[in-house]
Amino acid sequence: MKISSKESRLALINGFHLKNIRGDVLGGLTAAVVALPLALAFGNAALGPGGAIYGLYGAVVVGFLAALFGGTPAQVSGPTGPMSVTVAGVIAGLAAAGVPKDLSIEQILPLVMASVVFGGLFQILFGILRLGKYITLVPYSVVSGFMSGIGVIIIALQIGPLLGIKTQGNVISSLSTVAGNFQPNGAAISVAVMTLAIVFLTPRKISQWVPSPLLALLVVTPISLLFKDGGLDRIGTPGPIPEGLPSLSIPSGLYTINEYFPVILKAGIVLAVLGAIDSLLTSLVADNISQTRHNSDRELIGQGIGNAVAGLFSGLPGAGATMRTVINVKSGGSTPLSGMVHSIVLLVVLLGAGGAAEQIPTALLAGILIKVGLDIIDWGFLLRAHRLSLKTASVMYGVLLMTVFWDLIWAVLVGVFIANMLTIDSITETQLEGMEADNPFNSASNNNAANAQLPSDEKALLDRCAGEVMLFRLKGPLSFGAAKGITERMMLVRNYKVLILDITDVPRLGVTATLAIEDMVQEALNNSRKAYVAGATGRVKDRLAKFGVDVIGTRKEALTAAIDNLNG
């Protein structure tokens, strides 16, 4: 379909046009229905009593601006489980840095929102520096372990509210509070059980029209009023939810921000990295189901703008939300207009339904979040990783445990480092297959399978060498990992009169590996041995030339030259 000139003028960003306005409005409306209870639940989980409204603020601001400026047309953004857990961690970090624990949410909010603004600015910087393609290169074992860890954290933090026990802090402190003050509230448990029953047992035929979190909200909230005993305090509520637009609130008390600047800056980096990973993974899901291709760097800039502005309006930070994005696409949304409609609908709710939202029980929100936590856990990979690879399983379980009990960002960094080291080790083994200690290409072992890979004419030449030639074949791009294997085999040169290093199948040569080849050739010369490097072409040949390493044409030519040398 040809886009009109009017639609072209409206193409402010990738994929924004009016040809699917009906589908976008329907998709945005459906996504908003799902987002409402989740925004309230995430706000309450991140900031405690009174925090639900800030989740709604974040959903409105991030959802609109990330859609307007982002690079994934059908993506719906807003507060997510990982981002909410991180905000809760920011508060815990501030408390550890000396911020009084008895401060109200209004008193500590400027410090938290300062970190949100920093997180948004870092995300914009990531996009400007074009780091999007690198962020999505995180190994799956790390992503799986991290997301499963986030799911475990969400579930652990909601055990207290589900039982009607007030908790705060990280997983250990929350569970310690529950264990030390184990006085379950029957009314809260009843509300939670009803909520869990609805979100888990609602038939698909119903949930496709009325999402189960919203259904729980509409059914359980009126029933919870029956548990009144001098007010809803008996089962707890999110706290006051003011009606009206969020107001611009520049973080005040700069001296206080300066005092805790290191904690705030670190929190901003964590929010930026986590939000980037969360959003770009959702972008990949959106690409898969909508048959489109997102712009990673533009997406980071859009998410950064949304989060930076959300921090200025006291909104919870957000990221691309997988469930809301999938629902949007399946409901007909295909352009950024759907994400903007989602935010406008939530804004309308914010303007007129604050009083009703105040009646929502905390235990109900806890039930919804436990379902979210269980959905985030990568059960499919978690339960079978050990059968696929013990190394992969170890990385995943290690990242999971570090995420839950140590630190979110360090869990990812350590996991990526270990996973990459294991990958390099595996690649190195492949690169050095032709450099085994017993030299399978030596003519003394010409009946083995490796030697049989040689063409018949080259095999005949090698046989004529009568065990005086050591032939090493290297495969694939050679990195610093291969350099160690080359160096370890250097002493073998002394056992033969001629060394042939075949790098025909090496498309790329790292500096460290080049130095190792140079050292091996020099070792041969130092021991009065002849050395040939064969098969190098293009950039590989040019790099060897820069290191003063001469290259002979082909492996066959090297074998012929070796025979001439032995006969000479």
Image: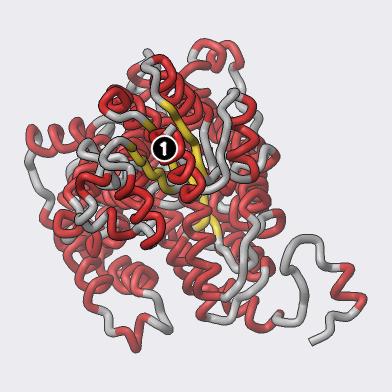
Q: Residue furthest front?
A: 568
Q: Nearer the viewer, residue 299 or 324?
A: 299
Q: Residue furthest right?
A: 5
The answer to whether residue 415 is seen in the rendering is no
Residue depicted at 45% across the width and 30% down the height: 531
Q: Position of residue 420 (x, y in %)?
A: 37, 39
Q: Position of residue 434 (x, y in %)?
A: 32, 45
Quarter placement of the C terminus: top left
Q: Nearer the viewer, residue 357 or 495?
A: 495
Relative to 115, is 164 above or below? below
Within 10 angstroms of label 1, few (less than 14), some, or many (20 or more) residues? many
Left-right relation of 476 to 331: left
Say which element carries label 1: strand
Q: How was the colour assigned to the protein in this rendering? A: secondary structure
Q: Amino acid at mark 1?
A: Ile
Q: Position of residue 262 (x, y in %)?
A: 49, 16
Residue depicted at 28% across the width and 32% down the height: 169
Q: Position of residue 558 (x, y in %)?
A: 48, 42
The answer to whether residue 302 is seen in the rendering is yes
Which residue in the structure is indicated by mark 1?
A: 500
Q: Nearer the viewer, residue 267 or 485?
A: 485
Relative to 354, is 138 above or below? above
Relative to 324, is 205 above or below? below
Q: How many marks?
A: 1
Residue depicted at 24% across the width and 66% down the height: 195
Quarter placement of the N terminus: bottom right
Residue depicted at 56% across the width and 58% down the height: 350
